[in-house]
Amino acid sequence: MKMVSAVIKHYRLDEVRKALLDIGIQGMTIVDVKGFGRQKGQLEVYRGVQYEVQFLPKVKVEVAVPEEKVEEVIEAIIKGARTGEIGDGKIFVYGLEDVVRIRTGRRGKEAL
């Protein structure tokens, strides 16, 4: 089992969610996050004063999937999140040692 974690632009969340639902992903976790990558922040103007925003708002999408679905999930996230501009985000894949469904006590793939 794997955890696929993607940091994407806020306004692409609906497209990513739809792309994941289209391939049969039934659950995901969404977290508002802040950070920066190569763009290292950006200049903003607020009430006529220019200031640098060092940490940009993003959304982190996490999906736990069986190993055989990882590539399909990655492609779905890319399809939904890609704009072709700097700051589209990143996808990280982690190994999951175990998953337990609290309600039933099922473990592993059955818990997903």
Image (cartoon, helix red, strand yellow):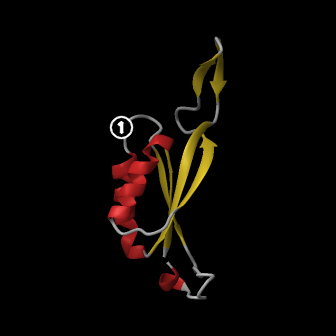
Q: Position of residue 54 (x, y in %)?
A: 64, 31
Q: Does dot 1 land on a helix, a strand or a loop?
A: loop
* Count of marks overlaid on the render: 1
Q: Is residue 55 above or below residue 31?
A: above
Q: Position of residue 60 (x, y in %)?
A: 55, 52
Q: Is residue 93 above or below residue 97?
A: above
Residue 9 seen by the camera: no
Q: Is residue 94 above or below residue 80?
A: below
Residue lying at 46% horizontally and 41% vertically, measured from the top left:
11
Q: Nearer the viewer, residue 31 or 52?
A: 31
Q: Position of residue 96 (x, y in %)?
A: 55, 74
**Circle 1 is placed at which residue position?**
84
Q: Nearer the viewer, residue 92 or 101?
A: 101
Q: Position of residue 67 (x, y in %)?
A: 42, 74
Q: Which residue type carries mark 1?
A: Gly
Residue lying at 43% horizontally and 44% vertically, measured from the top left:
12
Residue lying at the far top of the rendered structure: 48
Q: Give the side of residue 69 with respect to residue 57, left or right.
A: left
Residue lying at 44% horizontally and 69% vertically, measured from the top left:
26
**Structural crowding at the residue carrying mark 1, measured as other residues with C-alpha within 10 Å and reported as few (<14), some (14–19) or many (≥20):** few
Q: Nearer the viewer, residue 76 or 2?
A: 76
Residue 102 seen by the camera: yes
Q: Give the side of residue 49 with respect to residue 24, left or right.
A: right
Within the image, what quadrant is residue 43 found in? top right
Q: Nearer the viewer, residue 96 or 46?
A: 46
